[in-house]
Amino acid sequence: MDYYDLIIVGAGPAGSTLAQSLQDSGKRILLIDKQDFPRDKTCAGWVTPAVMNTLKIDRDDYSHGRTLQPIRRFRIGMMGQAPVENDHGDVVSYGIRRCEFDTYLLDRVTAPKMLSTPVKSINREGGNWQVNGTWEAPLIIGAGGHFCPVARLLGEGPGSHETIVAAKEVEFEMTPEQAQICQARGDTPELWFCRDLKGYAWVFRKENYLNIGLGREDNHRLTEHLEAFVQDMKDTGRIPADLPGRFKGHAYLLYAHAERPLVDDGILLIGDSAGLAYTQSGEGIRPAIESALMAADVIRDAQDYSASSLQLYGDAIAERFGTRATELEQGWQVPDWIKTPLATTLMRSHWFTRKVVTEKWFLHQQVPPLEAAV
C-alpha cells in the first residue's frame, strides 16, 4: 500500500488547482483521474479575466498553440424573439477549449498522477482511506464532478431535493466552408433563454471552433428543446446546416439548491463534486478554482482532518458564495420575480441583458478575484 497525505480524485480544474496550490506544503499528494489527458470535456468553455488572474495564467504564453478567444460582446435573447447585442468595449471573458485548458493546468502539477485510472473502491481502514486497495491517505478529496465517487460517500444531503441540470452540447472545428457560412462571431457568444426560463442555449464560436449546446433542469424535455433550437439556428443561418457527430451530455448541481455535505471526517468536496456551479448561469469553472484555493488554505493549516477541522472550508464557501437556499426556495437560473410576463420585455432591454444577465449572472463582475476578497 502506497501512503500519501491526501488523495485527490479528479484532475480537472478543481483537482489540479488544489494539487498545485499544495505543491510547496511538504504534503505527499496523489492525483487520480479515470481519463487520460487531453480529454474531451462537455462545457461551453469560457473563463473570465478574474479566473485567469487568480490562476496566474500568462495570456501570451497560453495562447501559443491553444485557443484563447477574446470576448467583448454578448448576443442575448429569448427563443422566438429578436435578440439584443451589447458591446462591453473591453475584453470581459475568454473562450477556451476544455481539452486544452484542463491539460494546461494539469501540466503545472508536479505531484504524482495516476491517469486512465477509474476509482473502483474506496474503503475506510484505521482512520485512513484506501483507494483501489493500492493507495492510502488520511484525507480524500472529491474533485471528479457531479458523479464523483468520493461525493457518493457523503450522500446527497437531507431531503435530496436537489435541482440537477442536464446539458447537451457539441464542439467541433469548422471546415472553411462551414466557417464562411456561420454567422456566429468569435467575440460575441450568443445566449438564448427558453421561453419558460428553465434553461438556456448557446452558440459560441472560438476562433475556428464552434460550440453549440443547451442546458435545462428538466432532463426529459432536454432533447426536444435542443433539437428545436438547433433547427432554428440552422434556419436563420446562425450555424452551419451540417453539424458533425453527436451531442454529448453532462449534469451538475446549482449551488443554491445543492444539498451535498462539503466535509466529513477525512473527506472534502470541491468544484462540481460539491455542487458549486453558479445558480443563475450554471458556470462552474470559477467556483471550482476558488473552492480549490480555499480548500488548500484549510488543508495547509489543519491540525487534523476531522470534520470539525475541515468545517473551516465549509464556512469559507458559505462566506464566499452565500448560504444555500432552503427547500422552499425552488427554481433555476433566474429569480422568481423574473418568471413573469415581464420576462419577454426584460430580454429585449439592453440595460437588463447587459447589467443583470451578462455582467452579474454570467461574468460576476461585482465579485472581486479571490485574492482581493480574503
Image (cartoon, rainbow, N blue to C red):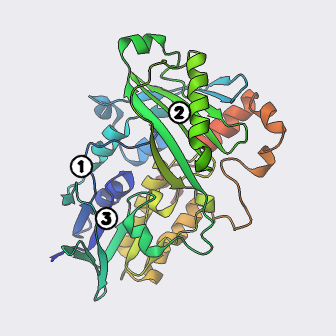
Q: Position of residue 63 (x, y in %)?
A: 32, 30
Q: Name the residue located 67 percent from the left edge and 37 percent from the top edge.
A: 194
Q: CA distance from mark 1 to mark 2?
A: 31 Å
**Viewed as shown, does residue 213 lie left or right of 20?**
right
Q: Name the residue located 73 percent from the left edge and 27 percent from the top edge.
A: 350
**Viewed as shown, does residue 298 lie left or right of 71?**
left
Lower sequence index among marks 2 and 3:
3
Q: Amino acid at mark 3?
A: Ile
Would residue 276 be visible to someone looking at this image? yes
Q: Name the residue located 36 percent from the left edge and 45 percent from the top edge.
A: 56
Neighbour tally class for label 1: few under 14, some 14-19, many 20 plus, Cα within 10 Å: few
Q: Label 3 belongs to which residue?
A: 8
Q: Amino acid at mark 1?
A: Asp
Q: Label 1 belongs to which residue?
A: 36
Q: Position of residue 130 (x, y in %)?
A: 26, 77
Q: Identify whether 273 is placed above or below 102.
A: below
Q: Which mark is residue 92?
A: 2
Lower sequence index among marks 3 and 1:
3
